[in-house]
Amino acid sequence: MRQSNKERDGTRVLEARGWWLIRLQCFDFMPNEGGVIVADVCTWKSIYKEEYVVECEIRGVHPGVRGTWYEGRNRALLLLAQETYGLTARRFKLRIRAKN
């Protein structure tokens, strides 16, 4: 049985969410401020093309469009917030580390 487009998109979002959950563990959490700190300004478009798409190709998984990848990021940030504060939590936000 073939998957519908909606089912495929849902699967791709879950794939992206899993990828983001692993990546976000490398960053610093600011649970009191509801955020995750990234080290510097990131070029998300480059990270999508050079890391996520390449990893998907290696695993034989279709990466979907960049919007699906961003939706996976948002869901991963929400899941991390819910694990920290409970199911009513708002999703964490990505914040850029202040330069000293």
Image (spheres, rainbow, N blue to C red):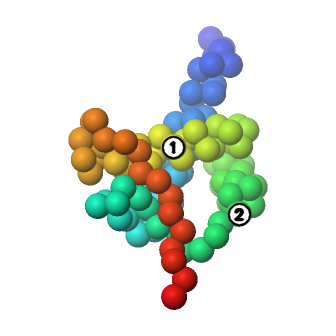
Evaluate whether residue 79 shows in this view. Answer: no
Residue 97 x/y as whole percent: 51, 74
Amino acid type of the residue that numbered disc 1 sits on in the rendered structure: Asn
Q: Please give the residue where the numbered disc 2 appears in the rendered image.
A: 43
Q: Residue furthest top?
A: 1
The image position of residue 80, as x and y in percent, is 36, 49
The secondary element bearing badge 2 is classed as loop
Image position, residue 85 (x, y; %):
24, 47
Q: Position of residue 81 (x, y in %)?
A: 34, 48
Q: Secondary structure at mark 1?
A: helix
Q: Residue at x 65, y 66 (%)?
A: 42
**Which residue matches tag 1?**
74
The residue carrying pointer 1 sits among few (fewer than 14), some (14 to 19) or many (20 or more) residues within 10 Å by Cα, namely many
Sequence-wise, the earlier of marks 2 and 1 is 2
Between 81 and 51, the residue placed more toward the observer is: 81
For residue 26, the mark is: none
| Above or below, comparing residue 7 to residue 47 in the picture | above
Q: Nearer the viewer, residue 2 or 13?
A: 13
